Structures are given as C-alpha cells and as structure tokens.
Image: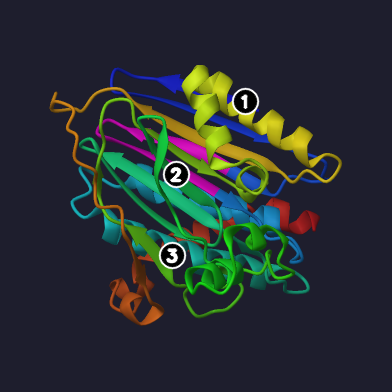
C-alpha cells in the first residue's frame, strides 16, 4: 500500500508491506490540518497477542487528538507527551476488554511539522531520521537493551545486529500500567530539501543509513520509499518483517525564509512517568479512551 500527497510546502509519501509474515502488525498514517501535518507510525510487538490492535489504537488515538485540536498547537512537545500518555492508557483498556484479558503492546513514533518546524516523540524502536544534504543529520535512539549497551560503549554498532537481546525493548505503549518513558526531540527548523523519514524495524534492521540516503537522492519520494521497502524485503528474504515507511520532503519554509547553513540542535530528552503525572492527570483522555475502544469493539470480538 502506497499513499502520496503534495502541497506547496511539502510532499509526503507512505508505504506499508507485509514482508514474509502471516499478518501485518505495522500501522501508519498522515494527518493534515490547515496549519500543520502529523506523521505517525506504530509497530505492534510480536510475542504479545493483539499487536495489530495496539498499533491501530496508537495511530487512531493520535490522529483523533490531532485533528480534533482547535487552532494552533502552542506547545507541540507537551501535546505529544499528553497524547502518547493517553494512547498508552487506551491500549491497556483495550486489552482489559478482551475475554480473556490480554496485554497488547506497540511502539510509537510521531512527528508534527508546524510553522516550518518539526517536533517529534517516540516510545520503542520505530525510528525517525532527519536527512539533509544527502546525509543523516539525526536519528532517534531506540528504547532497547542493545541501544543502551551501545551508548554505554559495551558493544559496537555491528554487534547490535547480532546480539541475542536485539529485539528486547525497554519501553513500549501498553503492557505495564505505569506510563512509559517518552523520548522527545528538540523542535527543529526545517530547511528546503530536508527529508523526515519514519520507519519500523523492518526497514532499518535491514538497510543501512547510506542505502536509505542513496535511494532518496536518486529517485522521487514515492519511488524512493517503495524501493527501500522492496530492497528490505529482498535482502531479508525469506524472513522479512513488515516494512513501513513514511517520508516528508520539505520544499519551502512557510515564512519564505532563506536556507541557512547552521545545523539544528537535535538532542532528545526523556520524559519520565513521574513528569507525566502533572500532565492533566490523563483526565482529558478518558473520553477518547472510551470512543477508541468502541471504535475497535468489533475487531476485539473477532480475537
């Protein structure tokens, strides 16, 4: 499945492939409003029943909160924190509604572009890349055991790919009732030609950063992400995972500003569960939780 859209300021494209799996637990979508666009991707975690429902709940809850928000989002980072926290509770409640109850889980990566600036947040190992001038300027750090070992200098990047704990996540949406640690990126001013790429591990676990950049440099946005997904399937055959990619190509700042040579600050900051206790106590999430559960009630009954 491929979805492409273009405006005067940006072009977006999305692709989703089954790979060599019996079911597709990846979900992704692009939501647009007059003054902003949101990209969201979720990968239902294998080994836990209902991963596809968890991923769908992530995308639907985030999309509903974004499209229902009236006016400009004044603090995008706080909005992302609140919405992901509400999404976590939605997934837990969906699992409790099952007979017998289950514990579905999912990753989450979401990016909002508003006023020519990108803000993002994530939980798990679905990634965001910021690509500028044919190089990866930044990528999110996975909430995973091997990423932690790598950051501590205990293993090399090559060893990450073969480590026996490479699929073990330290944070996820759903599962533990305690809200997960949400990692947020600093708001980043986009430059003309920048590409924001979100993907599941079915892509980044197979293709190198250089391979991604090369495809984006040589092809149109839609052709590039289709080629990436196809290459990932072929390289990993016959054990290819679901492969999902969303990309946004920024074409012009809304204020018409000139391209600058300075690199943005792209550090990330973790938001702990304690910090989120002050975020409206999740009271405002209850209505969305109930509506989301009702929306997927017919799917739950099938399980």
Q: Quadrant of residue 136?
A: top left
Earlier in the chain: of badge 1 and badge 2, it is: 2
Q: Which of marks 2 and 3 is nearer the N terminus?
A: 3
- Mark pair 2, 3: CA separation: 25 Å
Residue 237 % position (x, y): 83, 39
- Determine which of the numbered discs, if any, sits on residue 86 in the image: 3
Task: Using the image, determine if residue 126 lies above or below residue 28.
Answer: below
What span is in magenta?
A: 28-41
Calculate the distance from the C-alpha at mark 3 to the C-alpha at mark 1: 32 Å
* Residue at the image point whose x is 74% and y is 66% from the top: 48
Classify 10 Å Cα crowding around label 3: few (below 14), some (14-19), many (20 and above).
Answer: many
User: Is residue 297 visible in this depiction of the protein?
Assistant: no
* Pick the front one: 104 or 124: 124
Magenta segment: does it hold 9? no
Q: In which quarter of the image is residue 129?
A: top left
Q: Which residue is under mark 1?
A: 226
The N terminus is located in which quarter? top right
64 relative position to 72: left or right: right
Q: Mark 2 points at which residue?
A: 129
């Amino acid at each position: 499945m491929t979805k492409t859209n273009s405006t005067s300021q940006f072009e977006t494209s999305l692709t989703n492939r089954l790979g060599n799996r019996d079911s597709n637990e990846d979900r992704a979508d692009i939501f647009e409003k007059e003054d902003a666009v949101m990209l969201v991707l979720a990968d239902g975690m294998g080994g836990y029943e209902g991963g596809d429902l968890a991923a769908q709940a992530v995308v639907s809850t985030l999309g509903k909160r974004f499209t229902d928000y009236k006016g400009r989002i004044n603090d995008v980072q706080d909005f992302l924190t609140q919405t992901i926290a509400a999404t976590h509770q939605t997934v837990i409640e969906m699992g409790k509604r099952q007979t017998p109850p289950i514990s579905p889980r999912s990753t989450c990566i979401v990016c909002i572009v508003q006023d020519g600036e990108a803000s993002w947040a994530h939980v798990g190992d679905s990634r965001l890349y910021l690509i500028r001038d044919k190089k990866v300027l930044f990528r999110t750090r996975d909430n995973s055991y091997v990423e932690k070992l790598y950051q501590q200098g205990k293993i090399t990047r090559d060893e990450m790919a073969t480590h026996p704990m490479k699929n073990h996540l330290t944070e996820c949406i759903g599962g533990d009732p305690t809200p997960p640690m949400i990692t947020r990126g600093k708001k980043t001013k986009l430059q003309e030609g920048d590409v924001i790429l979100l993907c599941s591990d079915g892509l980044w676990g197979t293709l190198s950063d250089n391979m991604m950049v090369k495809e984006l440099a040589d092809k149109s946005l839609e052709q590039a992400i289709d080629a990436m997904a196809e290459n990932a399937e072929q390289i990993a055959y016959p054990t290819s995972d679901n492969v999902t990619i969303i990309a946004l190509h920024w074409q012009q700042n809304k204020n018409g500003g000139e391209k600058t040579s300075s690199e943005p600050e792209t550090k990330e900051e973790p938001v702990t569960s304690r910090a989120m206790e002050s975020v409206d106590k999740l009271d405002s999430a209850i209505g969305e939780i109930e509506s989301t559960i009702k929306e997927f009630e017919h799917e739950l009954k099938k399980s």
